[in-house]
Amino acid sequence: MRWEPGLRALFHGLPVFDPDSVDLRDLGGGPLDTTRAFALEETGDTGRDGAAARHFLRTAGYLHVPGVFDSGEVAAMLSDADVLAGEARPGDMASWWGRNAAGDEVLTRVLRAASRPDLRLLVDDARIRRVVDTADEVLVPKVPDDPEAVDLVTVLWKRPDMAEGLADLPWHRDCGMGGHALNCPSVVLTICLTTGTPEAGELRFLPGSHRGGFPFVDGTDVAAPDGVGLPIGVGDVTLHYSDLMHASLPPTSALGPHRISVLLGFAPETAGHHLGGRHYNDALLVNDDGQVDHLGHRLAEG
């Protein structure tokens, strides 16, 4: 997939993105602080400092909003996550599985988290919608509302010592398997329920990369960019454009807690699956045992 940026430049006029030469600026014309966080009241289309937050999202491609959910709300979400984990089964077409170094089957995602009523309500939570409204575009939930909807609300678990599967995501864009023209600009909102440190399995971003082409590369590859990691804590929210390069790296420690997150997707009303299916998970859930192939292998197969 190293040739993808060149093809996109030829066919779509999208410039090749160079993280070493990109020059991102804030509203005042100074260098953009790519680790900046915004309070909830600074987000949205009417926030007290909404112009700065909107400019940051537009320029960097992501947003970090600390302390959106309190400890009680997070505890309730973790309880729901435990229920979902207990219900998930390999091959149920609604969860991702991998294998650790010992060969054990390990759950890494549940895609039907909207079956838990409180998690389903997050889609219309005023705080969530306020953060999403920071985007210049008018965005709505990516999947129609339904208790058993797949991908309306997702729970993600980072696991240590993974040997197979898609627990750890390489540097990628969410539209990298196709559908950019139909789905973007779309966003993914993440609620952190534990911690987002490198030890827990951090999410890293490549600032400004939604404005250019950049190749897929494994996050642990010597050629991989460093990107930006953020001090994400319990109850924090992040928002990123789907076509921003980002990576979900392996935990650097075997000791927990490891990152557990809730994910919600938002897109233009006109968005749709480019192959006519439900969502991109249909291209990933192809194994009867629920094991999800590494993204690099799927992309290499075309």
Image (tube, rainbow, N blue to C red):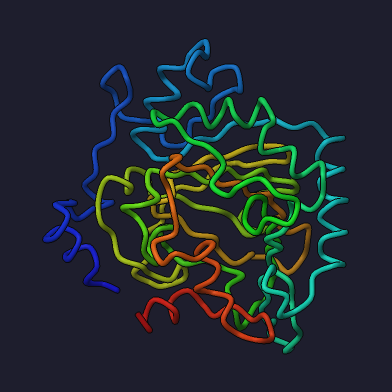
Q: How many marks?
A: 0
Left or right of residue 193: residue 86: right
Q: Name the image quarter holding residue 201.
A: bottom right
Residue farthest toward the front in the current orientation of the protein: 276
Left or right of residue 242: residue 64: right
* Quadrant location of the N terminus in the rendered image: bottom left
Left or right of residue 174: residue 282: right
Residue farthest toward the top in the current orientation of the protein: 48
Image point (45%, 24%), residue name: 53
Residue 103 picture location, percent across and down: 72, 89
Image point (30%, 29%), residue name: 31
Q: Name the image quarter holding residue 51.
A: top left
Residue 113 picture location, percent across and down: 74, 54
* Quadrant location of the C terminus in the rendered image: bottom left
Q: Name the image quarter holding residue 105.
A: bottom right
Asked if 231 appears above or below 16 in the picture, the reply is above
Residue farthest toward the bottom in the current orientation of the protein: 103
Image point (43%, 76%), residue name: 296
Left or right of residue 157: residue 225: left
Q: Nearer the viewer, residue 291 or 181?
A: 181
Residue 12 picture location, percent across and down: 17, 55
Q: Nearer the viewer, residue 91 or 217?
A: 91
Asked if 61 appears above or below 289 in the picture, the reply is above
Residue 184 picture location, percent across and down: 37, 47
Image point (30%, 17%), residue name: 28
